[in-house]
Image (cartoon, helix red, strand yellow):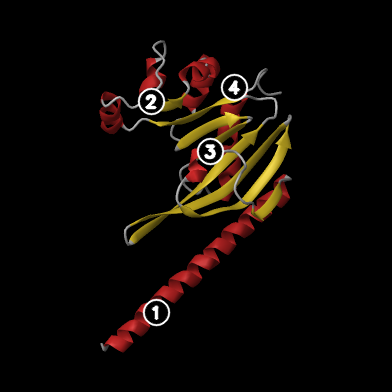
């Protein structure tokens, strides 16, 4: 094969891959729109970045927050959306795509915190090097399961046994969780099937309800 023909093949393959990607994105958007119509959510094709200063939204470049479906329930606004960002290292780059849930209640005052599942030996090494991880001596199961960072005094105030129990029950369903002021974000770590949205929303709501004074009506 001549260099010219090889170039044509490469261009054709790249073009086909791009067209397929566009087609899949349109199919996904149509699914979210259909769910919003059936379930009574509002829908935004391009929602822009949330105003809350979550760590996730400070990473990388080419940030996109799409297919946002939202509803109001018991004084809380619940939003699910597809969020993506790109991280570059040298000549290579990788785009991270995930579905996130953001729950907002104006009467809630959460401390700024980041929580994620513990990653075994890597986190043990970090702990030995003095990297912060808030533990609960009375709850070794929770402390072994998660890495939690934030202002320890404020975190202890809101992470009571009920909150810890709910987060433990949801382990495996999310990659990271962040709180700040009136808002909680649950990052599912991957794009969820839109048809399974109710299951993931319920997991996020179950945790959020434990943070709310008086729980959920």
Query: Which quadrant of the figure has residue 13?
Result: bottom left
Q: Which residue is mark 3?
A: 54
Q: Which residue is mark 4?
A: 210
Q: Which residue is mark 2?
A: 145
Q: Which residue is mark 1?
A: 11
Indicate which disc, 1 or 4, sits on the residue closer to the N terminus.
Answer: 1
Label 3: element kind: loop
Query: Which quadrant of the figure has residue 78?
Result: top right
Of circles 2 and 3, the one toward us is 3
Of circles 3 and 1, the one toward us is 3
Label 4: element kind: helix
Q: Position of residue 3 (x, y in %)?
A: 28, 86
Report how far apart the C-alphas of labels 2 and 1 lie in the structure.
47 Å
Q: Position of residue 20 (x, y in %)?
A: 49, 69
Label 1: element kind: helix
Report how far apart the C-alphas of labels 3 and 4 lie in the structure.
20 Å
Q: Is residue 52 above or below residue 216?
A: below
Report how far apart the C-alphas of labels 2 and 4 lie in the structure.
19 Å
């Amino acid at each position: 094969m001549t260099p010219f023909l090889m170039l044509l093949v490469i261009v054709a393959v790249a073009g086909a891959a791009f067209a397929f990607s566009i087609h899949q994105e349109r199919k996904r958007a149509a699914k979210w729109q259909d769910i919003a119509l059936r379930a009574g959510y509002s829908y935004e094709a391009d929602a822009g970045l949330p105003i809350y200063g979550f760590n996730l939204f400070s990473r990388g470049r080419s940030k996109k927050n799409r297919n946002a479906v939202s509803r109001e329930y018991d004084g809380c606004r619940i939003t699910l959306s597809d969020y993506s960002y790109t991280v570059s290292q040298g000549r290579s780059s990788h785009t991270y795509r995930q579905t996130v849930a953001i729950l907002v209640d104006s009467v809630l005052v959460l401390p700024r915190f980041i929580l994620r599942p513990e990653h075994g030996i890597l986190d043990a090494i970090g702990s030995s090097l003095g990297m912060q991880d808030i533990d609960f001596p009375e709850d070794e199961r929770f402390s072994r399961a998660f890495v939690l960072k934030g202002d320890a005094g404020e975190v202890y105030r809101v992470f009571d046994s009920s909150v810890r129990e709910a987060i433990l029950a949801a382990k495996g369903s999310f990659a990271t969780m962040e709180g700040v002021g009136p808002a909680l974000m649950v990052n599912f770590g991957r794009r969820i099937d839109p048809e399974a949205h109710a299951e993931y929303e319920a997991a996020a709501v179950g945790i959020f309800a434990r943070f709310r004074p008086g729980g959920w009506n």
